[in-house]
Image (spheres, rainbow, N blue to C red):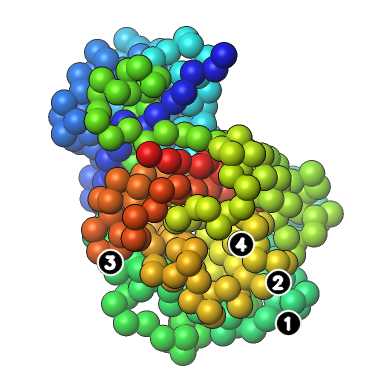
Amino acid sequence: MLRRVGIVAWEQSKSELEKEEPREDMIYYLVKALLEKNEIKREEIDTVIQCSNDYYDGRTISNVFTVVPSGAYLKQETKVEQDGAWAVFYAMMRIASGHFDTALVVGYSKGSEFDPWLAHSYCLDPTYDRQFKFLNDCSCSALQARAYMEAYNLTPQDLALVSVKNLTNGAKNPLSARGFSQLTVEQVLESPLYSDPLRELMCYPFTDGACAIILASEEKAKKLTDKPVWILGASCCQEEAYLGARDLTQLSSLKKSAEKAYKMAGINSPSEIGVFEVSEFYAHQELMITEALGLAEPGKGAELLKKGDTQLNGKHPVNPSGGALSANPLCATGMLRIMEAGKQLRGEAGEHQVDHPQLALAHGQYGICAQSNIVLILGR
């Protein structure tokens, strides 16, 4: 029988557009603060899982330089190269298996030191797509946005409404990299055009930041904290087809992930979930994500937003923290969604706190146009 796994502690460095400190310092002070704040000793951590990417760090086997800063020296340590939510999933599996009682997960990225769009181009087919040098993370997502808009008769204004909601929420989150206390649809549509129809404020900002999370078995979790957050369901899936053969108007892998996670958590309807923290790298993706999660029918995500249902005080709050449009430190973004979902359940989200949620959903994505997706259901 697999063991129950809980999240006992978390810590985040402030997301910024450019941090002066090197990644090793960023990680060291983050993990140090996490352990000290929660009165957990390094010796109590059984395994350390880092989430980083050699392309992002610009060096091979990049985690070898962060073993010591993360506190993983003389410990069982491994690395995940996808989004940090997969690293948490991996830690959960390790603990559930019975081989470990505790796990520390550290995800980090310094987007100011590399071009994320260029790095993501290495996900493309090397024989055809990559050689043309036209397709990258942003231009591919623009094709996705256009296909989605034309399929369901949506407008740039519909996409801009997502940016207005999330970037306004981001202003309430002191740890976000970007936020606006007042923002209008017109201002979003007047921001620089990146790749039609996507404009600057519809795209994630290149972000420096890190996140650390400690997970534990049920018995150990209850010893480490009096307010554990339990992982009730989790699932990840990848699109069956590659970019050129995919239906870009939907996220079928996310739909499958959500359905499996709901079943594992005993959830009959997504309306039972009190808050949703999702990784929307581009504005149109949040609309597609809400549809894949079952909150709206295909093409109806914009109507859900216009009704106010996904606002901070709505029926289905989505990204009260500001989401990835406010901060996207690649390799840590999915972990931020998990951390923010946990904070909501504990009532510790401050200005962007939702009214007493009992269940929360955290989502992560990886690959061009959200090629892979992961969903975790959390509860107290």
Question: Label 3, label 4: how many angstroms apart (C-alpha)?
Answer: 25 Å
Q: Earlier in the sequence, mark 1 or mark 3?
A: 1
Q: At which x and y percent is residue 311?
A: 44, 71
Q: Name the quarter where the C terminus is drawn.
A: top left
Question: Label 1, label 3: how many angstroms apart (C-alpha)?
Answer: 32 Å
The kind of residue on which mark 2 rests is: Gly
Q: At which x and y percent is residue 297?
A: 70, 66
> Compared to 321, does 11 lie above or below?
above
Q: Which mark is residue 153?
A: 1
Label 2 packing within 10 angstroms: few (<14), some (14-19), many (20+): some
Q: Name the quarter where the N terminus is drawn.
A: top right
Q: Which mark is residue 118?
A: none
Q: Which mark is residue 295?
A: 4
The kind of residue on which mark 3 rests is: Lys
Locate residue 155: give its quadrant: bottom right
Q: Residue at x 63, y 47 (%)?
A: 268
Q: Earlier in the sequence, mark 4 or mark 1?
A: 1
Q: Is residue 284 visible from the viewing direction of this image?
A: yes
Label 3 packing within 10 angstroms: few (<14), some (14-19), many (20+): many
Q: Nearer the viewer, mark 1 or mark 2?
A: 2
Asked if the residue at tag 2 contacts the one at tag 1, i.e. Cβ–Cβ closer than 8 Å, the answer is yes
Locate residue 11: give its quadrant: top left
**Mark 2 secondary-structure assignment:** loop
Residue topped by disc 3: 172
Which residue occupies the foreground of this view, 267 or 81?
Answer: 267
Which residue occupies the foreground of this view, 302 or 219?
Answer: 219
